[in-house]
Image (cartoon, rainbow, N blue to C red):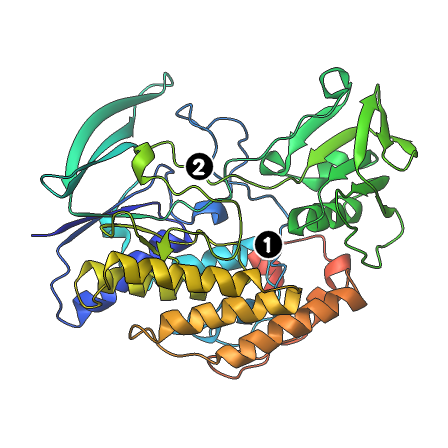
Amino acid sequence: MSRIAVIGAGPCGLAQLHAFEQARQDGIDVGEVVCFEKQSDWGGLWNYTWRTGVDAHGDPVHGSMYRYLWSNGPKECLEFSDYTFDEHFGGPIPSFPPREVLFDYIAGRAKKSNVRQFIRFDTAVREVTFDDAAQTFTLTVESWEAAESWEGTETTLSTEVFDHVIVATGHFSTPNVPEYPGFATFPGRILHSHDFRDAVEFAGKNLLILGSSYSAEDIALQSRKYGAASVTICYRNAPMGFGWPDGISEVPALSHVEGRTAHFCDGTSRDVDAIILCTGYQHNFPFLDPELRLVTPNNLYPGGLYKGVVWTANPKLLYLGMQDQFYTFNMFDAQAFVARDVVLGRLALPDADAMAADVDAWLAKYAAVDSVEGQIDFQTDYVRDLMALTDYPDFDLDLVRQHFVTWEHDKDESITGYRDKSFASPCTGTVGPTPHTTWWDELDDSLARFLRRG
């Protein structure tokens, strides 16, 4: 019997388990599938924890989720084509839900698919090696069981052999942390967005944020919304340029820090109480043998992955969700169905030269992209290519593509109001209702509050 290891039970890992379960329900022998999850519950980054630094077992905390996070894109753009929001919630809900609502949705399909039985929680993969002669992988895993006393946990270390390995750990958990002169003596708090948990912590504070992408944008808004006295966003290349509310501004790159005073490259300076580094994440797979590790910056098409999924150097190893993302959950689904069919032999792989040529063609296409709209079109084409390879249920990709473009324009029109817009489902056509409270005025992000009608 073929044995397949899935590493991680976040959105990518759950998509993979769902794909295998769909095949099993169709009467296909998928072999033995084992998913290893180092956290005590599924959901990956959506499994919110108050912890920062290290977890209960001394490992780096995986999650970067924070309280009051809301979807920063329309939910209709990530909807599962075979498990709609209408099905899960029993009717239409607004287009920009908070984290608790999205976690509930992710878990809902996983429960319906009954995939929890395949997951070993509180189990971390420590090492993955490949035996060329046997054509198998050996995984060294560490599992914890709660001890009966306050003293902690009991741990066991074991090895298991698998025919295929699917890496579904994501790439938003190992922070990229730059260093600037004066950081060592800054008297306030310096943290990466990975460790940001509650905007209320910075109420009344003057905050400096380094970065100019989604994390910087959202944490700046969250912090000001929940009471920060001021937020200064420091960009390295170009400002985001939104119509920020009073109290948020953008300045050029940080030069250095003296005491509490931040000095910028344009000669200006500001006194700040805390610094948040929204400086991105690294692809990091310390559990993989170096010869098996994907090495890539964060971009829309990592090299070395056929169809963005199959490790060309060893096609028995596959990766999910390694791209920078406009598309998320439904792209992970499309990737998972491709990975499943490759593993099961339902999707034949070309030879090494043909796989390399396909990767090169996508990289050349990506190199020609020169705008945000071009990036959206590129990833739309990528998802379309994936969906043509398997039986993953169709959804209206062209509508999703248009939603992304509209969303980008909505943000330019109102960075505090774009989450109040409504979009149509690419699966059911249902239009999300107007939220009962505008996002900027809504301080309660609970599922119960969001789903309240009227």
Which residue is pictured at 42% across the width and 49% down the height? 43
> Is mark 1 in CB contact (under 8 Å) with mark 2?
no
In space, the residues marked 1 and 2 are separated at their CA atoms by: 32 Å
Left or right for 198, reference 90? right
Which residue is pictured at 74% across the width and 65% down the height? 411
Q: Is residue 18 above or below residue 203?
A: below
Tell me the amino acid under the disc marked 2.
Asn
- Name the quadrant containing residue 8: top left
Q: Position of residue 406 (x, y in %)?
A: 67, 74
| Depth check, front residue: 126 or 268 | 268
Q: Is residue 449 above or below residue 424?
A: above
Left or right for 406, reference 306? right
Q: Which residue is mark 2?
A: 284
The disc placed on residue 425 is none
Which residue is pictured at 44% across the width and 66% down the height? 330
On the question of residue 83 being in view, the answer is: no
| Depth check, front residue: 321 or 363 | 363
| Depth check, front residue: 451 or 63 | 63
Depth-wise, is mark 1 or mark 2 nearer the camera? 2
Q: Earlier in the sequence, mark 1 or mark 2?
A: 2
Q: Position of residue 39 (x, y in %)?
A: 38, 38
Q: Going by the picture, which residue comes out furthest to the left?
A: 1
Mark 2 Cα shell of 10 Å, populated few (<14), some (14-19), many (≥20): some
Q: Quadrant of the C terminus?
A: bottom right
Left or right for 269, reference 82? right
Tell me the amino acid under the disc marked 1.
Ser
Q: Position of residue 331 (x, y in %)?
A: 43, 64
Q: What secondary structure is found at the residue carrying circle 2?
A: loop
On the question of residue 159 being in view, the answer is: yes
Q: Which residue is mark 1?
A: 446
Q: What secondary structure is found at the residue carrying circle 1?
A: loop
Q: Position of residue 95 (x, y in %)?
A: 61, 70
